[in-house]
Amino acid sequence: MLGPAVSCASHHAHEDPYLKRAFLTLSSPISHSANALAANLREEALRGDPRYDIDEADIHRFGQAGFAGIAQLLRDEDPRVRSAGAFYLSRWNRSDSVPFLIGLLRDNEPWPDALGFYTLSPARTAGHLLGSMYACSNSDRDRVPVDERSHPDVGLARQRWYAHHFPYCFIEGSAQLPIYYWYPMAAYFEVPAAEIQAFRSSHPESFRCVPFVTIGASKNVYTSNEAIPVSLSFSNYGTDLMWLRYDQTEVSVHHFELVSDDGKPVPMRRHALKPLPPHTPLKQPLYGDCAFGLGGWVLDLADLFTIPGPGEYRFRYWYTATDDRDAEGCSVDFGLRVWDGRAYSEWFRFVVTP
């Protein structure tokens, strides 16, 4: 059972880019002794009494082949074996095991781990291991694309999120106790975290003014009689200060658009926008290096737009820089950046049901 699993690894990696990173470890032949180790661990898991533990001697003896052999357990038909495989991979090298947990485990129900304790489902274990990732949004991680709403799979959604963001993590600590720090700037420029500083030094002009807007939404499916609350937050990954005209009623600067699934724009109720409170400065500083973001805009899209009824919709926001640029700082046009369940987009897509 264990031997043929390696031969189909490249086939699956070719079909699914999310698995490609994990299967790189399985690209070389697995030794007979590593296969025997995996088979022994499988039998122990099926008996329900796993006694084996991974130690430094095993890691030295089997090397990477042992790790790859155990990784095969994650593709076993029996959930007890998959559970044991996740446990042993984590013990072997917690850092290297993360791509396997992301790419190979699809269980959504909790199962007992190799020591008999109930743990998070395997699909969430990757998130548990990456729990130290900075600025990680649960709503983004769990967002299922609207075209998959008939068969929502949160486990797959999390796989996609972690598979996309894992290359943009700094990994510190030991192999057994790694700490993952997601570097949002690296993800924004799609440059591996380890290379972002060198990239920044060689492209200083690209980093002068890098503002963007993120959206917060707890879900993307709503009924026709409920509010559709979203929050907008402004950030700047650039090195220069930017002064933001912060009055959302200023129509020459702030633009809001909602489009139905047939491509028609949905009428907007501008009176639903809230002006700045009295004595509030018109311009607000948007500091560089994402030191301090600006948040607090909460919009109810059901109130802001005259939504005609059930259907699919997409919302976007963008900011148009004014001509009265300050002597200090920078000024550029920018817009929404939202994770849609597969990739980053300028649109927030949602569904209204009857």
Image (tube, grey):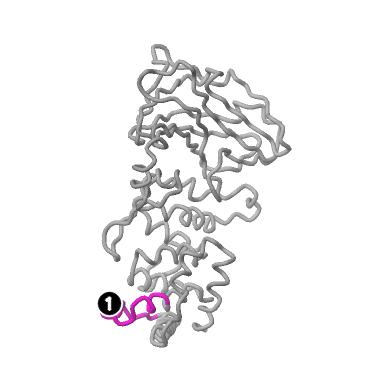
| Residue 111 vertical position relative to residue 198 in the rendered view, above or below | below
Report whether 350 appears left or right of 109.
right
Q: Secondary structure at mark 1?
A: loop
* Residue extending farthest front: 202
Residue 342, image x, y percentages:
56, 51
Examine the rendered structure and indicate whether residue 298 appears above or below residue 174: above
- Assess disc 1: are there few (<14), some (14-19) or many (≥20) residues with their C-alpha within 10 Å of its C-alpha: few
Report if residue 286 is visible in the image: yes
The residue at the point 33 percent across, 78 percent down is 63
Residue sitting at x 46%, y 69%: 24
> So how many labels did they put on this image?
1
Q: Amino acid at mark 1?
A: Asp
Q: Which residues are magenta?
A: 49-68
Kindly give the residue lying farthest to the right in the view shown.
262
Q: Position of residue 303 (x, y in %)?
A: 60, 26
Q: Position of residue 59 (x, y in %)?
A: 30, 77
- Magenta segment: does it hold 236? no
Closer to the camera in the image, 67 or 306:
67
**Is residue 7 rendered to the left or right of residue 194?**
right
Q: Is residue 215 above or below residue 190?
A: above
Which residue does the numbered mark 1 point to in the structure image?
55
Quarter holding residue 317: top right
Give the overall secondary structure of the magenta segment: helix
Quadrant of the image containing the C terminus: top right
Query: Looking at the image, which residue is at 40% across and 43% down?
Result: 185
Q: Is residue 354 above or below residue 107?
A: above
